[in-house]
């Protein structure tokens, strides 16, 4: 039944029932017409509830298909990551230094297809969740209408039964005719009561379906939140390392913690021959120079090193006097500088390793920063212990909102090689 016709029929029923005591006190034909109208309205509501239940089943199935699509897309991303890792690992194991090969076209297409599949799955789940919520609301509305119709039907039966009793008492002279009329009224009342019970059962079933749809919607919302969290974590793990220089309206910058460092401390910057590591090294050099640090050298290295950032402090050379105040002061200033850098990188979610350089390996009082591959949380830290240790290295200072910064400067240029001076 169309919505406009359904509303018009309901209005006619209510108006007819409002005039019932005066127009049809004991007329069985009027009672039958009222019951027939109520039956039609209840049947229309039952049909509408069944249609909504079918739609709910379709959207539930569609939501599961979208979740499977997200899983397939993420699996495809992992395949691409593992493939790149294997190629890099083979080059490292064979100790081959050669120009980069042309990226395979299948991997690019596969990566694009997997990303589009994840995007389609996420939007599909969001649309299915909204549609299920809409169906849930409409089912609750239909259940309320069914209960109202049931109450209205019971009121009609109760009022008409009372009128029939009064008419039967007043028609004592025509006992035979009144008895026949009462029998007919009782039969109609019994039939109407049975129909009202059936309507009540349908209303109870519709309410149960509405509750089931509500539970399904809550489950889909939780699954969508988990999928969004995993997707955001995957994007962060694939993005290159970058710490922008931000300045807020009150003049505070995100490198203020680097400015109070030991005077005369020089930084030896090293990085592996990798594009992402080289850009991270250029970013570090840009931030340190902006904070007033001196970069003694910035060179690529040809040996293996740990993933992430390694910060090494100075140790006096072999045979040096342990009681030499100058050596002790140089070691202490290097340790202070190392700890300052360690806290800064930890606050920006870069996983710093820290320790000491070999004795006499770097200049007195300096500190060395070695940039390796970006660590992946899916392969390098499956247990989460490094992530927990990173939290212990962070400072307790409250973080400022990057969106409130008045200016943001990105350092994306390739690293500039600064030769190391002769010792």
Image: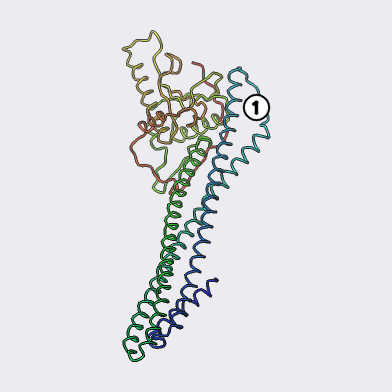
Is residue 323 rendered to the left or right of residue 273?
Answer: left
Is residue 58 rendered to the left or right of residue 179?
Answer: right
Up the image or down, 192 lies above or below 28; here it is above
Up the image or down, 312 lies above or below 245; here it is above
Give the residue displayed 48% in from the left and 40% down from the top.
Answer: 230
Give the quarter of the image for residue 172. Answer: bottom left
Residue closer to the observer: 387 or 137: 137
x then y, percent, for residue 11: 46, 78
For the residue labelled by badge 1, is the local secondary structure a helix, a strand or a loop? loop
> Could you classify mark 1 by the number of other residues whose Cα lies within 10 Å: few (under 14), some (14-19), or many (20 or more)?
few
Q: How many marks?
A: 1
x then y, percent, for residue 78: 56, 34
Residue closer to the observer: 261 or 279: 279
Quadrant assignment for the N terminus: bottom right
Residue closer to the observer: 101 or 249: 101
Give the quarter of the image for residue 113. Answer: top right
Residue at label 1? 100
Give the quarter of the image for residue 207. Answer: bottom left
Extreme residue in the top direction: 319
Extreme residue in the front direction: 176
Up the image or down, 417 lies above or below 13; here it is above
Give the residue displayed 60% in from the left and 29% down from the top.
Answer: 83
Up the image or down, 244 lies above or below 326; here it is below
Give the residue displayed 42% in from the left and 57% down from the top.
Answer: 208
Q: How is the image coloured?
A: rainbow
x then y, percent, for residue 193: 40, 71
Residue closer to the observer: 240 or 142: 142
x then y, percent, for residue 137: 45, 61
């Amino acid at each position: 039944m169309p919505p406009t016709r359904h509303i018009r029929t309901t209005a006619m029923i209510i108006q007819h029932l409002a005039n019932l005591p005066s127009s049809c006190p004991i007329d069985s034909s009027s009672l039958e017409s009222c019951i027939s109208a109520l039956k039609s309205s209840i049947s229309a509501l039952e049909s509408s509830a069944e249609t909504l239940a079918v739609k709910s089943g379709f959207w539930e199935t569609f939501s599961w298909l979208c979740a499977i699509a997200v899983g397939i897309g993420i699996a495809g991303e992992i395949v691409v990551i593992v493939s790149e890792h294997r190629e890099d690992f083979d080059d490292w194991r064979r100790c081959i230094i050669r120009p980069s090969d042309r990226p395979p076209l299948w991997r690019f297409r596969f990566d694009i297809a997997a990303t589009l599949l994840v995007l389609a799955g996420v939007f599909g789940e969001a649309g299915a969740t909204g549609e299920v919520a809409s169906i849930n609301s409409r089912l609750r509305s239909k259940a309320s209408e069914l209960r109202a119709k049931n109450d209205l039907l019971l009121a009609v039966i109760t009022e008409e039964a009372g009128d029939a009793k009064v008419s039967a008492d007043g028609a004592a002279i025509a006992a035979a005719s009144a008895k026949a009329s009462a029998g007919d009224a009782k039969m109609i009342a019994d039939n109407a009561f049975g129909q009202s019970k059936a309507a009540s059962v349908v209303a109870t079933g519709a309410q149960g379906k509405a509750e089931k749809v509500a539970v399904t919607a809550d489950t889909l919302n939780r699954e969508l939140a988990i999928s969004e969290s995993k997707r955001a974590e995957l994007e962060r793990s694939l993005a290159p390392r970058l710490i922008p220089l931000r300045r807020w309206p009150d003049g505070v910058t995100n490198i203020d913690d680097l400015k109070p460092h030991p005077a005369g401390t020089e930084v030896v910057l090293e990085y592996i021959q990798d594009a992402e590591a080289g850009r991270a090294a250029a970013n570090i050099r840009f931030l340190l120079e902006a904070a007033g640090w001196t970069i003694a050298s910035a060179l690529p290295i040809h040996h293996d090193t740990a993933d992430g950032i390694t910060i090494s402090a100075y140790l006096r050379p072999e045979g040096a006097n342990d009681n030499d105040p100058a050596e002790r002061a140089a070691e202490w200033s290097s340790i202070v500088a190392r700890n300052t850098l360690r806290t800064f990188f930890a606050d920006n979610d870069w996983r710093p390793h820290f320790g000491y350089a070999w004795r006499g390996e770097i200049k007195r009082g300096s500190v060395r920063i070695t940039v390796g591959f970006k660590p992946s949380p899916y392969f390098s830290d499956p247990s989460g212990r490094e992530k927990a240790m990173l939290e212990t290295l962070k400072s307790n200072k409250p973080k400022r909102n990057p969106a409130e910064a008045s200016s943001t400067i990105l350092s994306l240029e390739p690293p500039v090689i600064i030769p190391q001076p002769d010792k």
